[in-house]
Amino acid sequence: MTEPSVAPERTIASFPRLSRLHDALLGAKKEVCIQRARYLTDYMKGAGVWFEPPVVRRARAITHILRNLEVTIYPDEVLVGGITSKRIGAIIYPEFIGLLIWPELGNLREREVDALQISDEEIKELDQEIFPFWLDKVLAWHVQEFLSPPEPLSLLFKGGFFALTEAAGISHTAPDFEKLIEVGLEGIKEEAGEKIRELDQDPAGDAEKLRGRSFCRAVEIVCDGVIGFAQRYHEEALRLAEKETDPQRKSELLEIAQICARVPAKPANSFREALQSIWFLEIALHQENYEQALCLGRADQYLYPYYRRDLQKGLLTEEEAIELLGCLFIKMSEFVPLFSVNLALLFSGFPANPAVTLGGMMPEGLDATNRLSYLFLETRELIKTRHPNLHARVHKDSPGEYFERVCEVVKGGGGMPALMNDDVIIPALMKKGIKEEDARDYVVIGCVEISVPRKTFGSTDAALMSLPICLEMALNNGYSPVLQEEIGPKTGDPRAFRNMDHVLDAFRQQVAYLVEQMVIGLNSMGIAHRELYPSPLLSALTQGCLDKGQDVTAGGAVYNFTGVQGVGVADVADSLAAIDQLVFREKRVTMGELLKALEDNFEGHEQLLHLIRNRVPKYGNDDELPDMYARKAAEIFCQEVARHSNPRNGVYLPGFLSMTNHKGLGKFVAALPSGRKALETLANGVSPHDGWDKKGPTACLKSVAKLDYSQATNGVAVNLKFAPDYLKGAHGTKTLSSLIKAYFGLGGMHLQLNFIDEQTLLDAQQDPGKYPGLMVRVAGYSAYFADLAKEVQDEIIARTEHCSL
Amino acid sequence: MPEDGIVFDLQRFSLHDGPGIRTVIFFKGCPLCCQWCQNPEGLEPRPEISFSKEKCLGCQECQKVCPVRAIVFEGTKRIDRQVCDRCGKCVEVCYAEALRIVGKSYTPAELLEEAMTDMPFFVSSGGGITLSGGEPTCQADFLTSFLPLCKEKELHIALETCGCFVYEELEPLLSCVDLILYDIKAIDPVLHQKLTGRSNKTILENLGKLLKKDECAVQVRVPLIPTLTATDENLKAILVFLKEHNITEVSLLPYHKMGESKLEGIDSPLRPLNLARMSEQDLMNISALFRNAGIKALTY
Ligand code: SF4
Ligand code: SF4
């Protein structure tokens, strides 16, 4: 490549439009938007809908929403389209878990965690018109009533065991935006029409195939719905242009009108049209399924031809490209999820995680880094918005310059981009039956999950499950001390365990039981999604669906997976190490004494607590004993998960990320043999327990790299926090990149870094208004620090400050 | 049997003691006794017991096991140093880690294993190990068996030294060392004697010999202790000395208090200096002084 790739010295001051838009974003209140809920309800109240095939009904419902959702073009915008009617809005999905907010409506504005604005009239409409209609139409209700045996849902509602996020929606995918900009929605419609004609001419009248006809009809309907939505923006831009007195803005508005008349219906003709087209689809997809991790995928790859062509034709400069990317980042940050108080603790900081993946390898195996990869990084450096969640893929032949540029941008704060290791991930995906060229094309979904873009419906964050509670039940013969209930299988009185094999065996049985319950619950939900609320629009943009004539929820995609996360690997590892060393090897305590201490939450057992904390090695210190148990605990979860299949004819994939669920799930676990006290937080992702990695980042990363990631193909989260001044300047950047290279060489899969000093954080906690834009990486995602629950803030502050001297 | 080494700490991911990512090995024992010593627990050659009152639970387990009744419960003290024979029994039972042994024996092979743990990071960053202390050359016998093992593994080796060693003892080891980080504290012998307890005659001579020998790179470092070494007079004398020896680059190590907080827990002849930390401006002024004399001053 002959283009220059050294970053020119550009600052936000060179982008006045961007900085105005960014200020407007930061200044906007977060509000609830009830429009989607209103128009969906409106449509579903129609008597005729119950005679439509579900997939057609869904397509028409989405179309109805898109016909009515308020259209707004804000000052300065060149990329347009509101995902809600508010500047920053939260969407309500009443058919999924939207009703959870019902009892909290009155308190939304004042609540401590993730507060949201909503007017009295809006509350009234939800309370009287919208929510009552949905009572018996909620997906989880249907699952409970008709599909699932009682146990999985009763475990779900107890909290503490697992969160089944499919109750809230599926999403978590990277649709085929490449095809969208190449053929336009009209092209896709054409394909659906072609398919229908083909079916109509099938003399055999094959029942399976005929089933596909309604699906193809739904695709046509929903494509028209989206095209109509863009048309409304075309009209709005014309209307504004007419009134506009500033000639420059007037011509901008006319250009917007022109673009909205073309895309997403037609193929994109330019870089800007491609972005606008994708953004319209993002809006529409968010009306169809919930707002979690509808990802852009490898945007630096599929946008590159448009960028290069425009650049060569002199239609675009680098600066203009950055401005457009910045506009996209800002549009992507105009929505937040709506969580009830309990959920807000599990997923604190308004995560929605639409992700963009940069760099890495091309399907043919060559390095994929291009000029746009650098421009994405630069845009991120200029405006640190909540979204998109940026991920940088690297492999052993990634250009050193790209590697260092990534490190430099991470050092700028906010924890983005996170790094993903191609050399570990690609072989792991191939082991799961993914073709090599597809594996090389992988993207990151949301936080850390891994998926083949365009071809996969992977439900990568279907559930998160607590591993420590399994160990706890293994040590209590199936009993949960916090819930004070017999839950798991009877795995025997632990006082009779003679060696670690007995402990591990009991642990495995408890894991197997919980995984099984989780899978039954999830599979029931998967069926409900298919039967009640299919996703024709997403299916139109997922390869395989039109071929098979099947919705994504029915298994239409080329690849079908369900991804589930294990939470608390380090807690289990440290606990097993303590039992091994103290009970069986050194025989310093008996199992009975240990259990008594746990029951007493170590009160009156300070000696034992210190023995455990200080004399038993902990995961994260490059010590073989706990590291071996971390590997073992992860392996047990992976093996138990891998046994299961989903209703879409795909298998379950295990991963280890926790969002902020390690906090919430910790509240259901009493004291552990690791020395963690009752109800305290669990460890995050596969990171060590907070503050227990005492030998610095090299030891920590070596421990982490010992896990077997070839099985954890749904992705893992590893967090490392640095005081920014420790890796100052170009020299520090080099050191950081060599640290990461060595870690990846050792087999590490993922790394995200936080560069923030404690003082800044304490300050931000005291006075959130002072740092509205301070981003931190929470777990697999970044959030504004001010949006986080106090407890989560505390955790970030406490997370080992490596080398702060 | 080769002699064991006594090491009181191993610090991984150290970035400021030589190039790249390094593991610093702190050897026990030092011939000097600098007033500002950052690692006062490294002065004495023998292992010793440190006590941290913050960590003490008051459980009295230590008292139960001490064979010579050296455990006392008064003020910030826990050990009667006159009586204690450093058997380590109390440390054994102090799970709170209030009592700790400073200084552990390693065979050359054992220490090599520790030194090698971060090898992948050394390779990727051009780092290695740094011998520090205390004064590593105090354990020259141990180094004689240890360093060749390291070289065999192609470890990059840096040696931090105060320069107070018998040159003939070190010379055969120089082929194993890649970089020497050499402290110059004061030029006036009387001042040096006052600040460190020893004359600087050997130190300055040894540096001359090393520079002539040209076998390994030498980086001179100057600790900047306000009112003690960072005086106009001393700095000027250092400049003259550096010029005489054609040294064109130094590292400046500004004072910080970290070492002083350790004094309370050990039996040390040193007392906290409690000096104010050096301001950025002072540091810049001193850097400029060196720069103007044509010597590049590195600060971390
Ligand atoms: S054993 Fe340790 S914690 Fe207990 S009294 Fe002695 S010094 Fe304190
Ligand atoms: S080291 Fe031995 S002699 Fe000294 S205080 Fe401890 S137990 Fe007593």
Image: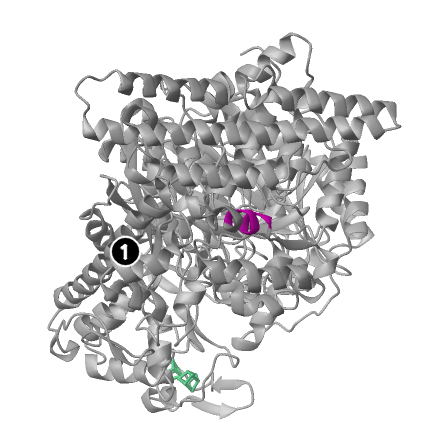
Relative vertical location of residue A547 with respect to residue A613 in this rendering, above or below: above
Residue B247: % across, % down: 67, 35
Residue A751 visible, this angle: yes
Label 1: few (<14), some (14–19) or many (≥20) C-alpha neighbours in 10 Å: some
Left or right: A209 in relation to B278: left
Label 1, on which residue? Answer: A624
Does the image show residue A6?
A: no
Looking at this view, is B279 or A259 the one in front? A259
Q: Which corner quadrant of the image does residue B119 belong to?
A: top left
Residue B163 percent location from the top left of the image: 56, 49
Q: Nearer the viewer, residue A289 or A499?
A: A289
Disc 1 chain ID: A
Residue A75 versus residue A414 in the image, above or below: above
Q: Residue at x 58, y 66 (%)?
A: A105
Name the residue furthest top.
A313
> Looking at the picture, how far across and down is residue A2, in whole percent?
57, 10
- What range is drawn magenta here? A35-40
Q: What residue lies at 67% left-to-right and 39% top-to-bottom?
A: A383
Most distant residue in the front direction:
A47
In reply to whether residue A206 is colored magenta, the answer given is no
Q: Secondary structure at mark 1?
A: helix
Q: Amino acid at mark 1?
A: Glu
Figure quadrant of residue A307? top right
Residue A490, image x, y percentages: 14, 73
A11, above or below B141, in the image: above
Q: What secondary structure predominates along the stretch shown in magenta?
A: helix
- Position of residue A367 in the picture relative to residue A86 (left or right): left
